[in-house]
């Protein structure tokens, strides 16, 4: 038999005892409660064989039947000193740690489970650095024992007598606070100096926490003593007031509150709540902080409009006149307001509507709310929801918080003073969500006609009736409003104004307002039609009229200066030349249709937030391998439209007179100018097809023709949106013939009659019909 190596001498197969929430160190005596059958068998084996037991901590304390992956690899071999059977079948075992060991192999299927363990030796050569570490650790431990009171002074004295670094480190670990993972990390540290350094750091952290705890405890004790003294003095003061006839006998403050509560005309439940709080207030010490809270609460209850309301103006003709005076167009919104007034006249039991005006900035959503209030003879209140991210902004804070207040809904109702105002929730799509809650969820109750009759504010803690409020919300985009909130509102879409509408708004609203603002008179200047059109087309690009208003104001200011410096100045006509003189070079260029036929160029139409525009789609071919290139910052949908058009041309090459292999021998490049502007949507399908076919055949499309419509691979032309804006843009550019999808015939009533007279419309259902118009020599008749 070969002699054993040194490692074999240090290796032993020992019974295994897994520990759930404990780490045992060498030289540490600790009691353990053993209850698992396998663990009991391991203890019995140790008692019978008088051999050590190996203690190993589990990585997951919840695992009742740990496997090798649930056990750490470093543990402690220990002697079983004492065992005691307990009535519930478990066993109390007192063990003493002997030394560290590392598991080489598990025998968990054996009965009892065992592990092949290699002993870990930790030599600690003496030196000044190690001695300094021992002294530092003892110093921190002595301070820890003094601050915590958990370690007897005798233990500190005994540890000072220990001379070996590894022994001292393990003995300190026995009394060290900390979690299982930290203790296991110390057990696995094989270098005594490193273990002492880690122990010193942990003790320093604990000592700092104890110092902070002591400081806080002393501060709290001082505050309590001061509070008790103040309470004693307040009780004395209360007794003096009672002797002199305090507020219980009808002091001015109490009488004032009772009068406020009585005049508020609260509902029965609210009045009972107010009287209960009033009774509590009378029993409060004069200077009690809670008394101030109750007084503020009672004032809020009394000042909220429980019964006060304004009488609606049910004159439909007057309401129509007011709405027309303040806003041009917006017929759908005005119609909805007049419908509500008509129903209100016929039935008194009608809940306030909840409208949501959706449209781009500057179209008059916010000012429309004020016009609605004026038309109905109601008061108006507005709350801006942009940037709100806290639910308490809507529902308020509970009274337990210092400085608590009701939410913005109740605050605005108190401010307006009636329970049936026109309430505008501005920028409802700009709310945010964070850890403080979701304000849009709090608005669900406010904007639900079935629930807002009993709206609950966290501060008031009583129900408030919002059913008579006319809610008007505004939003720039419908899709940024949460679905549940959007479902509770009646969406009224407000598209951007066309150039015709902007011109009418400028003449009827903006110009008179700016003339008056600048102190001018009609005798000082007059805006001609071509001057207004120049401002709209060359100096603004917007859906609303805010920039138009600013440009008109700029012209009025310059005229005002001329009037001041030259009092005898004759009336100034503001035409195109004067606009350029006053406002400088135009900011935007005008787009006009091509005057001559251009091969490979087709005119499409696009909808934008600022209205509409035309697109000159250019296609060029070159010898190559059939590659299709798309440029001009096109979106994915527009790229797919180009690919669909390319596939249609390949599929119908013979019928269109194209070479059958053109897709293999010719590269095709499609470009839409103004590449800095993103473009997307399916409506350019017909124009893309015409442009590509023109480049392949060398035949130019008809001059003065534009087109829109989505195409399919089968050659169908599908309807698109924004027809009104697109047709107006084409009309401005000089287009006099337009190809539209047949199903868009329904949009003709929205187009100005003047525009319809100037343009010939061709309605198509198939691509072949559009190609016949685009490349036909005869004049194809238009239709409306």
Image (spheres, rainbow, N blue to C red):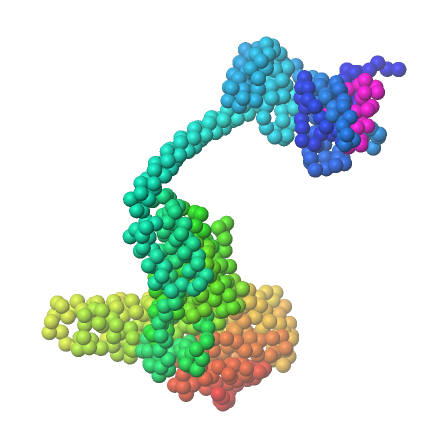
Q: Answer with the quarter of the image where residue 37 lies.
A: top right
Please tell me which residue is depicted at 38% across the width and 55% down the height of the picture. 298
Horizontal side of 517 relative to 611 (left or right) equals: left
* For residue 365, side relative to residue 530 (left or right): right
- For the point 12% across and 67% down, the residue is 565
On whether residue 40 falls in the magenta region, the answer is yes
Q: Nearer the viewer, residue 512 or 408?
A: 408
Span highlighted in magenta in the image: 36-55
Q: Quadrant of residue 345?
A: bottom left
Residue 468 on the magenta segment: no
Percent x, y of residue 35: 76, 31
Residue 393 location (% of width, % of height): 43, 55
- Name the side, left or right, on which 54 lies relative to 48: left
> Which of these two is toward me, 10 or 30?
30
Q: Which residue occupies 29% across, 44% down?
A: 244
State the predominant SS element of the stretch in magenta. helix
Image quadrant in which the N terminus is located: top right
User: Which residue is more in the foreground, 714 or 510?
Assistant: 510
């Amino acid at each position: 038999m070969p002699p054993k190596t040194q490692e074999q001498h240090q290796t032993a197969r020992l019974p295994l005892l897994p520990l759930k929430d404990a780490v045992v160190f060498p030289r540490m005596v600790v009691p353990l409660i053993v209850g698992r059958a396998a663990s009991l068998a391991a203890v019995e084996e140790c008692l019978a064989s008088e051999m050590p037991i190996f203690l190993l901590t589990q990585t997951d304390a919840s695992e009742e039947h740990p496997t090798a992956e649930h056990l750490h690899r470093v543990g402690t071999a220990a002697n079983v000193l004492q065992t005691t059977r307990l009535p519930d079948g478990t066993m109390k075992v007192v063990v003493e740690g002997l030394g560290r060991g590392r598991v080489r192999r598990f025998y968990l299927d054996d009965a009892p489970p065992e592990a092949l363990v290699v002993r870990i030796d930790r030599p600690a050569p003496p030196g000044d650095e190690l001695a300094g570490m021992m002294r530092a650790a003892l110093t921190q431990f002595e301070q820890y024992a003094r601050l915590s009171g958990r370690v007897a002074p005798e233990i500190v004295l005994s540890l000072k007598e220990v001379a070996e670094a590894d022994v001292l480190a393990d003995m300190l670990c026995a009394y060290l606070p900390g979690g299982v993972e930290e203790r296991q990390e110390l057990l696995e540290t094989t270098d005594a100096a490193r273990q002492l350094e880690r122990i010193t750091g942990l003790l320093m952290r604990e000592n700092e926490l104890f110092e902070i705890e002591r400081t806080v405890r002393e501060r709290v004790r001082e505050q309590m003593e001061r509070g008790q003294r103040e309470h004693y003095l307040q009780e004395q003061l209360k007794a003096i007031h009672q002797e002199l006839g305090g507020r219980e006998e009808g002091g001015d403050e109490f009488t004032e509150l009772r009068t406020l509560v009585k005049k508020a005309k609260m509902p029965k439940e609210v009045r009972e709540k107010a009287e209960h709080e009033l009774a509590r207030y009378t029993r409060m010490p004069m200077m009690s902080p809670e008394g101030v809270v109750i007084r503020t609460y009672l004032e809020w209850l009394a000042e909220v409009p429980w019964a006060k309301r304004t009488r609606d103006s049910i004159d439909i003709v007057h309401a129509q006149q007011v709405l027309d005076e303040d806003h041009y167009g917006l017929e759908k919104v005005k119609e909805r307001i007049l419908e509500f007034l008509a129903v209100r006249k016929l039935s008194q039991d009608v809940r306030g509507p909840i409208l949501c005006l959706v449209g781009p900035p500057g179209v008059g959503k916010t000012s429309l709310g004020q016009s609605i209030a004026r038309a109905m003879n109601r008061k108006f209140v507005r709350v801006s929801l942009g940037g709100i991210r806290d639910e308490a902004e809507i529902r308020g804070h509970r009274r337990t918080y210092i400085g608590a207040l009701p939410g913005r809904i109740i605050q605005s109702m108190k401010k307006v003073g009636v329970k049936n105002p026109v309430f505008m929730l501005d920028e409802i799509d700009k709310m945010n969500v964070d850890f403080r809650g979701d304000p849009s969820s709090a608005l669900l109750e406010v904007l639900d006609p079935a629930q807002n009759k009993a709206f609950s504010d966290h501060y008031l803690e009583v129900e408030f009736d919002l059913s008579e409020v006319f809610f008007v919300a505004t939003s720039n985009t419908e899709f940024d409003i949460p679905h549940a909130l959007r479902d509770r509102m009646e969406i009224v879409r407000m598209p951007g104004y066309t150039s015709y509408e902007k011109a009418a708004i400028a003449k009827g609203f903006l110009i008179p307002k700016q003339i008056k603002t600048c102190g001018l008179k009609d005798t000082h200047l007059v805006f001609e039609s071509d001057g207004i059109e120049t401002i709209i087309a060359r100096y603004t690009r917007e859906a609303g009229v805010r920039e138009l208003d600013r440009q008109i104001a700029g012209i009025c200011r310059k005229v005002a200066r001329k009037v001041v410096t030259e009092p005898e100045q004759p009336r100034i006509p503001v035409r195109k030349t004067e606009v350029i003189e006053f406002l400088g070079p135009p900011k935007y260029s005008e787009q006009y249709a091509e005057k001559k036929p251009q091969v490979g160029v087709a005119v499409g139409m696009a909808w934008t937030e600022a209205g509409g525009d035309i697109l000159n789609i250019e296609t060029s071919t070159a010898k190559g391998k059939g590659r299709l290139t798309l440029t001009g910052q096109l979106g994915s949908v527009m790229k797919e439209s180009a690919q669909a058009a390319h596939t249609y041309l390949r599929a119908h090459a013979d019928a269109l007179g194209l070479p059958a292999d053109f897709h293999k021998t010719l590269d095709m490049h499609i470009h839409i100018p103004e590449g800095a502007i993103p473009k997307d949507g399916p409506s350019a399908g017909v124009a893309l097809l015409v442009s590509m076919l023109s480049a392949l055949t060398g035949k130019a499309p008809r001059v003065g023709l534009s087109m829109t419509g989505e195409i399919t691979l089968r050659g169908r032309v599908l309807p698109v949106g924004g027809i009104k804006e697109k047709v107006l843009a084409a009309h401005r550019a000089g287009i006099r013939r337009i190809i539209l999808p047949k199903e868009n015939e329904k949009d003709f009533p929205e187009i100005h009659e003047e525009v319809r007279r100037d343009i010939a419309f061709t309605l198509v259902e198939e691509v072949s019909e559009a190609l016949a118009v685009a490349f036909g020599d005869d004049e194809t008749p238009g239709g409306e």
